[in-house]
Image (tube, rainbow, N blue to C red):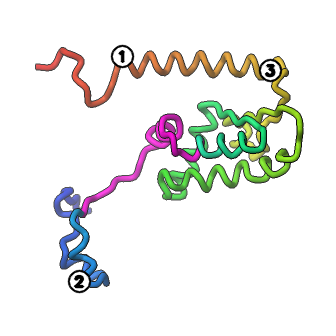
C-alpha cells in the first residue's frame, strides 16, 4: 500500500472539478487542506475546554430546565470513543449526547426538585441510564470531590508538559 505525502493528498482545482464541482465554485475556494481524524484524547479535550462543545451545550440545556449535568472522565472517554467509531469527529459528539441524554432530560424537565444527573463511563458501557440524585445526597459530594481531585491532578500534568511549547531545555 502506497503512502502519500500531505502535498499529494491536497486536491488540485482540476481534481475538484473532475469530482463534480462547478468551476465557478472551485475558484471561490481559496484554501484546500487535508484533515486527519481526531483522537479520543482530542475529542475529550474538546468537550472539556471548548465553550461550544456538545458537553457544554448539554449542560446549558439541563440548566434551562433547572437540572445539572456532570460527567466523569470515563464517561467523556466513552462518548469520544463512540463518536470516533462512527467516524463523525467532534460534530458526532452531539449525536452521542443526544442518544444518551435526550430521554433523561425529557423525563426530568417537569420536576421541581433540584436534581443532578451524573453520567459515568460505567453506565454508558452497560447501556444504563445516568444516575439521578437530589443535590443534598452524600454520594454527590463524594463524586464532586473525586472529580475535583482528578481535575487538579490533570491540570498539574498539563502545566508540566505542554505539547508544542519549549520547556527551556531545547537545543
Q: Position of residue 93 (x, y in %)?
A: 56, 50
Query: Which residue is drawn at the image coordinates 46% and 20% (left, top)?
Result: 155
Is residue 15 shown left or right of residue 111? left
Precedes in sequence: disc 2 or disc 3: 2
Precedes in sequence: disc 2 or disc 1: 2
Asked whether 82 or 50 is in front, the reply is 50
Query: Which residue is drawn at the image coordinates 57% and 38% (left, top)?
Result: 77
Element carrying mark 2 = helix
Mark 3 vs mark 1, CA separation in Å: 32 Å
- Tell me which corner region of the image, top left, top right, bottom left or bottom right, holds residue 33: bottom left
Q: Which residues are magenta?
A: 32-55
Residue pointed to by mark 2: 23
Disc 3, disc 1: CB below 8 Å? Answer: no
Is residue 44 part of the magenta span, yes or no?
yes
Element carrying mark 3 = helix
Disc 2, disc 3: CB below 8 Å? Answer: no
Residue pointed to by mark 3: 139
Residue pointed to by mark 1: 160
Is residue 71 shown left or right of residue 53? right
Amino acid at each position: 500500500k502506497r503512502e502519500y505525502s500531505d502535498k499529494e493528498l491536497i486536491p488540485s482545482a482540476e481534481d475538484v472539478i473532475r469530482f463534480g464541482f462547478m468551476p465557478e465554485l472551485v475558484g471561490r475556494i481559496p484554501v484546500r487542506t487535508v484533515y486527519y481524524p481526531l483522537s479520543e484524547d482530542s475529542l475529550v479535550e474538546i468537550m472539556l475546554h471548548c465553550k461550544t462543545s456538545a458537553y457544554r451545550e448539554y449542560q446549558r440545556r439541563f440548566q434551562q430546565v433547572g437540572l445539572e449535568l456532570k460527567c466523569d472522565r470515563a464517561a467523556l472517554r466513552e462518548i469520544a470513543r463512540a463518536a470516533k467509531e462512527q467516524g463523525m469527529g467532534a460534530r458526532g459528539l452531539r449525536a452521542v449526547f443526544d442518544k444518551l441524554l435526550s430521554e433523561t432530560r425529557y423525563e426530568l424537565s417537569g420536576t421541581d426538585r433540584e436534581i443532578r444527573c451524573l453520567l459515568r463511563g460505567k453506565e454508558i458501557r452497560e447501556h444504563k441510564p445516568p444516575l439521578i440524585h437530589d443535590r443534598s445526597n452524600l454520594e454527590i459530594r463524594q463524586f464532586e470531590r473525586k472529580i475535583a481531585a482528578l481535575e487538579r491532578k490533570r491540570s498539574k500534568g498539563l502545566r508540566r508538559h505542554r505539547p508544542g511549547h519549549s520547556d527551556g531545555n531545547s537545543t
